[in-house]
Structure formats: structure tokens, C-alpha cells
Image: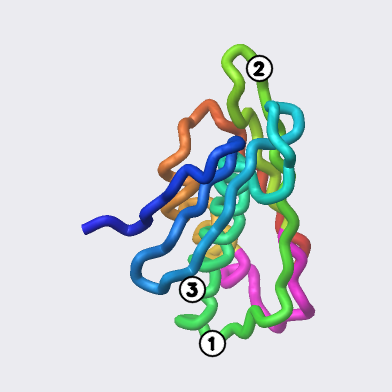
Amino acid sequence: MATVKTIYKGDLRTEATHLQSGTKIITDAPTDNNGKGEAFSPTDLVAAALGSCAMTIMGIVANRENIDLTGTDFSVVKVMGAEPRRISEIQVEFNFPELAIDDRQRKLLENAALTCPVAKSLKEELVQSLRFNW
């Protein structure tokens, strides 16, 4: 069974529907690639997916360790390469609230982020730079 159904809306725009929830995401080509840049580009979604996946897996580990990560934020920088046009690097910077955790727990959380399913699904030549501000 499909997970997502997507319709091409024309003018370099798509509308993807998550079939289980009905949530919709619009994508638009970026301005540097003939688009309007009025929504996430497909490559923006890949970059965002890495950060969101890493955060989600850290959340699973945090729940198991009784650590509250509420308030953690992260920013994502996508670096595009050329010939062929592709994502060459994704930088994710996590900013954690003050946490009462030890080195073992920090390492568990960092390893969870670095080994999340999206991270493991991307090509090895795509540089993944994850920074953890404790």
C-alpha cells in the first residue's frame, strides 16, 4: 500500500498527501532552478527529513532514558552542489535546553541522531554535519 500520493499541479509544483493522516505538503522548485520558491523544494524536504528523523530517534532514546527534550530546537542548512545538481551537504545544529544528563546519555543521544534511518539511507558522499549544543 502506498504511503504518499502526489499530484503534479503544474508550474513546477506538487501536492503530496500522506495517506494515513491526510496531511498535505506542497513543493515548489527553488528560484535558482526555475521555480517560484514559494514552498519547500524537494531537496529542502530531504534536508528537513534528516533533522526531523535525527530529532525523532533522539526523542525515542530520551523517552527510554527518562530525559525530557522538550524545547530542543534545530536548524538545517542545505548546501547544493553542481554537475550533477545535488545536495552535497546537510548541516543540522541542535540546541538543547539545560539537561541533567551524563556523558553516557549524551553519547546515546548523539549516536541515535547520527544513525537515524534517514541518515543511513542517504549516499555516503553526501556530507552530514550534525552539531550538538548542550
Looking at the picture, how far across and down is residue 74, in whole percent?
Answer: 72, 61
| N-term mark: 1 or 2 | 1
Identify the residue shown where x is 73% and y is 39%: 36
Residue 18 is left or right of residue 85, and the answer is left
Identify the residue shown where x is 52% and y is 57%: 111
Nearest-to-viewer mark from 3 and 2: 2
Question: Judging from the image, what secondary structure is the residue with disc 3 in?
Answer: helix
Disc 3 to disc 1, how far (Cα)? 9 Å
**Whether residue 126 is situated above or below residue 43 in the rendered picture:** above
| N-term mark: 3 or 1 | 3
Three-letter amino acid code at the position of disc 2: Ala
CB within 8 Å, label 3 to label 2: no
Q: Which residue is mark 1?
A: 66
Q: Which residue is mark 3?
A: 61
The quadrant of the rendering that contains the C terminus is bottom right
Identify the image's colour scheme: rainbow, by chain, secondary structure or one colour: rainbow
Q: Quadrant of residue 64?
A: bottom left
Number of residues whose C-alpha sits closer than 10 Å to that of mark 3, classed few (under 14), some (14–19) or many (20 or more)? some
Looking at the picture, how far across and down is residue 8, in whole percent?
Answer: 47, 43
Disc 3 to disc 2, how far (Cα)? 37 Å
Q: Quadrant of residue 87?
A: top right
Q: Which residue is mark 2?
A: 82
Q: Is residue 129 magenta?
A: no
The stretch in magenta equals: 94-106
